[in-house]
Amino acid sequence: MPLVAGVDTSTQSCKIVVRDAATGELVRSGSAKHPDGTEIHPDHWWSAFTQAADAAGGLADVAAIAVGGQQHGMVALDAEGRVIRDALLWNDTRSAGAAEALISELGDGDRAVGSQRWADAVGSVLVASLTVTKLRWLRDAEPENAARVAAVALPHDWLSWRIAGYGPAGDPSAPLGPDLNALFTDRSDASGTGYYDAQGANGAGEYRPDLLRMALGRDDVVLPRVLGPAESGGVAHPSVAGVDVDGGALIGPGAGDNAGAALGVGMTPGDVAISIGTSGVVSAVAPRRTADGSGAINGFADAAGNALMLAVTLNAARVLDAAREVLGVDVDELAALALRAPAGSDGLVLVPYLEGERTPNRPDATGTLHGIRLATSTRPHLARAYVEGMLCGLADGLDALRAQGVPVERVMLIGGAAQSPAVQEIAPQVFGLPIAVPEPGEYVADGAARQAAWVLAAAGAAGATPTTADAGAPSALAPPDWSATISATLPADPRPEIREQYAKVRDLA
Ligand SMILES: Nc1ncnc2c1ncn2[C@@H]1O[C@H](COP(=O)(O)OP(=O)(O)O)[C@@H](O)[C@H]1O
Ligand SMILES: O=C(CO)[C@@H](O)[C@H](O)COP(=O)(O)O
């Protein structure tokens, strides 16, 4: 049976899984780290991808590949395919002022009107994470760089383009050169730019050049072609990264990471995923998005033709990393410490806005510890307060999702920090719900692999020439029937006092 590869080019690392296209069985995997920071040169993603491919035993035998990745990052390319400046990532908050300016402009000076108009137009009220705000920032802060922009891509688009053999003129690792028109993306990631309406053009989706122009001052830039869920954007070039199967491996459209995870765990309406990676994400698949003018919920697209509704926090797994740093412990010791303190940590509450915050929109906020007394000045109390505060931020996101009418029938816990025993014990207390934990895995990369298998099936056979016959529409074929194995279902253990004490101090800072 042919093999397929799924890639997750995430904030902290690049992860690759190789799976059997028919059964979904995991054959091998590899990963490599990205540097820290909220701006990064995309060459680091390329180098981590090639290292991860090596660690996964190479990709020479895969028949299709697809890339999921961190959303929203601004990859600005010049006419020669060169990266103009380090990419500004989703968690870079310098464009918060630009977001406010764009909201006001679309609202003719009225913030509330502008917020609703952005939500109606593209599914989301603008915050610093969204690409369109980064383009406005570039126009104002670095006009000489803005003037050179010939194309704007997202992290997964850029990596797919490089795998296809394109890249900066003269770069030996980019034998096909800088053809900007070869860039492609998918609906899920395009829907996070702020200049793509996934429900426009009668549901087919369309770019909004007017909104791009509002941000950048012009719209004469190449935007990646938006592919359908099972459409191939090209083939992997034989001379890059050992992706050298005869005839080339098909490259799938890819996906934003949260849409990738939804495909990876096999989410259907009624399922809610709580992902604790660098970002904290509460997400659900729905037939259509709503337009939440409050800004709590982003109405993006998923990778299979539906909407993906999500609340995203900037402060998730790294809050626990920060607690480990403060306490000088590893992940297991942090969990053990946290579980030695009582629920509610005797009133010690962390409001975890360590990186500012996105939901709620407080880009300049800092974290605050409330309720410090002699009795709560212990290592277990501190460890538990960090875990509870981080989870309370996500519980607010689940409330916001419910407020949009999203059904909540099954809650699943995924992402790196979902493996923490403290998170697994405390999450059912904070959410007050039973929580299903899929077996440990890389669900974004798995979703990308599932998409690659779908693309392969839609193309007819392994090694087939890519087709555009199904452009813009879901294939007649559904994605292969893989889904996550649930390894544990944690019973609900409601401790409302944890959220009550958090709610009392959340807005004081
Ligand atoms: N057992 C654990 N307990 C707490 N945190 C963990 C654990 N395992 C991994 N992490 C954290 O999860 C994060 C990585 O998760 P991941 O979902 O891969 O992030 P991303 O996709 O944003 O790169 C890191 O911050 C890491 O420290
Ligand atoms: O900004 C969002 C979604 O809107 C984040 O979910 C990013 O897509 C980063 O994801 P991770 O690297 O944390 O998985």
Image: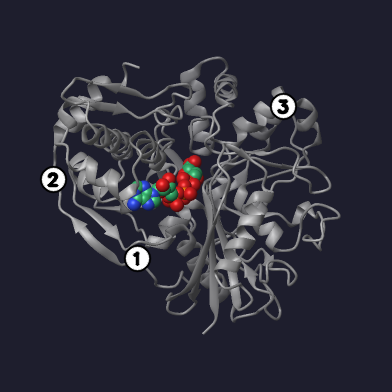
Residue at the far bottom in the pictured view: 1
Q: Are marks 3 and 1 in contact (CB under 8 Å)?
A: no
Residue 331 at x, y = what percent? 33, 48
- List the residue tagged with mark 3: 139
Classed neighbour count for the residue bearing mark 2: other residues with Cα under 10 Å, few (<14), some (14–19), many (≥20): some
Q: Is residue 458 left or right of residue 271?
A: right
Residue 493 is tagged as: 2
First along the sequence among labels 3 and 2: 3
Residue 279 at x, y = what percent? 43, 42
Residue 480 at x, y = what percent? 44, 73
Quarter of the rendering occupied by the C terminus: top left
Residue 61 is tagged as: none
Q: Amino acid at mark 1?
A: Ala
Classed neighbour count for the residue bearing mark 3: other residues with Cα under 10 Å, few (<14), some (14–19), many (≥20): some
Classed neighbour count for the residue bearing mark 1: other residues with Cα under 10 Å, few (<14), some (14–19), many (≥20): some
Using the rendered view, name the quadrant where residue 245 is placed. bottom right
Element assignment for label 2 = loop
- List the residue tagged with mark 1: 484
Using the rendered view, name the quadrant where residue 410 is placed. bottom left
